[in-house]
Each structure stands twice: as C-alpha cells, then as structure tokens.
Image (tube, rainbow, N blue to C red):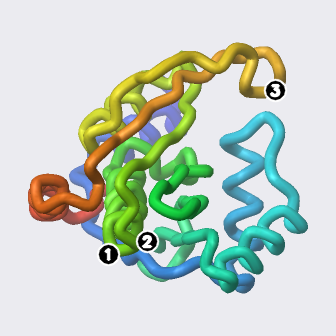
Amino acid sequence: MSIVERFLDRAQSRPMEAGEITIEPMRKRHLRHILAIEVQVYPKPWSAGVFHDELAQMRAGTRHYVVAKLDGVVVGYAGLILITEEAHVSNVAVDPRYQRHGIGRRLMLALCLAAAQRDCGSMSLEVRVSNTGAQELYRSFGFVPAGIRKRYYENTVDAIVMWCHDVNTPAYAAQLAAIGRSITDFRR
C-alpha cells in the first residue's frame, strides 16, 4: 500500500467532525455555488439564466427556493413551484461530497414546511427510476409513487411521479415535527 493510499484509508476511517448546517432562502449571491453543484449532479444542468428566472418567480411568490450551508458554504439547494393549493418539488440537489449525510432531508423538510405554511393540500415530484436513495427519502416524507413519466430525463431516463397528500393537516405537521426532531448534527 502506498503512502497516499494509507493516508486516504486513515482519512476515511477517522471519526467524523460535526458541522453546522443552516437552511436559508436562496439569493443571487448563492448562484456561483449552486451552478457548481448543478453541473456535478445533473447531466443537463440548469443555466444561470434559469436560476435568475426562478429567483424572479420567488419574489413574485410562485416559487420557494432554499440553500443548505455547511459552516457557511453552500452544499445543497432545493425548490418548490407553488400552484394555488399544490406544490411541486422542482429540484433537490446536494454536492456529491456531502450526499448521504442528511442534507437532502433538511432541504426536503424546509420545502414541506413551506408548502404546509402556504396551505398546500398536496405536493408532487419526479425522481429517476434508478435513484432509490432519493425515493426512500421522499417516502419518509409521505410521498408515494403514482405513475411513470417515460423518458422524462434527457429524453432517455424514466421518472417515477410521486405525490404526498394532506400536507396541510395536523397529522402531517406532526410527521414533519418528528422528522425535524430526528435530524442530528452533520458528520463529514
């Protein structure tokens, strides 16, 4: 084993350090970091122009976008399209270096709370058929599969359509509160 391999092996087996994660509204100043994540996680990433348009829609009240920061650095983002009494999750993305550490869960919690606060009765989203980790996350928030959109992603990959109903009920508020209590500090 080389010196580099031993160093990497030790770094991966070290106890993880805690970090502070905050969720805040997306702003233009975050776009540089968001675009860097976007190109890493999507084969056909959104452009800066698309995000500028979405931020304008956010100011108009038809969108809700948040970013996740780890120790002040943007490591993820998520968005909702708000349509009267429904909300559609447009994206949830986490920097690949920080995936599987609960950041997506925090982002989803923020989106679900926003939908409930706006008295949305239901939420929907699409997720890649192959992305079982995301499907599991969405199920934990009450989303259930409702159908398939053929060739939805890049005109080649199918998506599962998932819905969550009764988002504006006390029972769902209790479910979100339980999820919020279960979230622990981030570990690198």
**Residue located beneath label 3 in the image:** 154
Query: Is 70 displayed left or right of 183 in the figure?
Result: right
Helix, strand or loop under label 1? loop
Query: Is 87 displayed left or right of 109 in the figure?
Result: right
User: How many residues crowd around disc 3 within 10 Å: few (fewer than 14), some, or many (20 or more)?
Assistant: few
Note whether residue 79 is visible: no
The image position of residue 169, as x and y in percent, is 19, 58
What residue is rendered at 77% in x and 48% in y? Answer: 39
Where 6 falls versus 177 (above or below)? above
Helix, strand or loop under label 2? strand
Determine contact: label 1, label 2, CB under 8 Å. yes
Helix, strand or loop under label 3? loop
User: How many residues crowd around disc 2 within 10 Å: few (fewer than 14), some, or many (20 or more)?
Assistant: some
What residue is rendered at 72% in x and 74% in y? Answer: 57
The image position of residue 148, as x and y in percent, is 57, 16
Note whether residue 60 is visible: yes
Q: Looking at this view, is 185 or 150 the one in front? A: 150
First along the sequence among labels 3 and 2: 2
Query: Is 114 displayed left or right of 130 in the figure?
Result: left
Q: Amino acid at mark 3?
A: Glu
The image position of residue 13, as x and y in percent, is 28, 40
**Residue located beneath label 2 in the image:** 70
Per the model, the C-alpha gap separating discs 1 and 2 is: 6 Å
Q: Amino acid at mark 2?
A: Leu
First along the sequence among labels 1 and 3: 1
**Residue located beneath label 1 in the image:** 20
Q: Amino acid at mark 1?
A: Glu
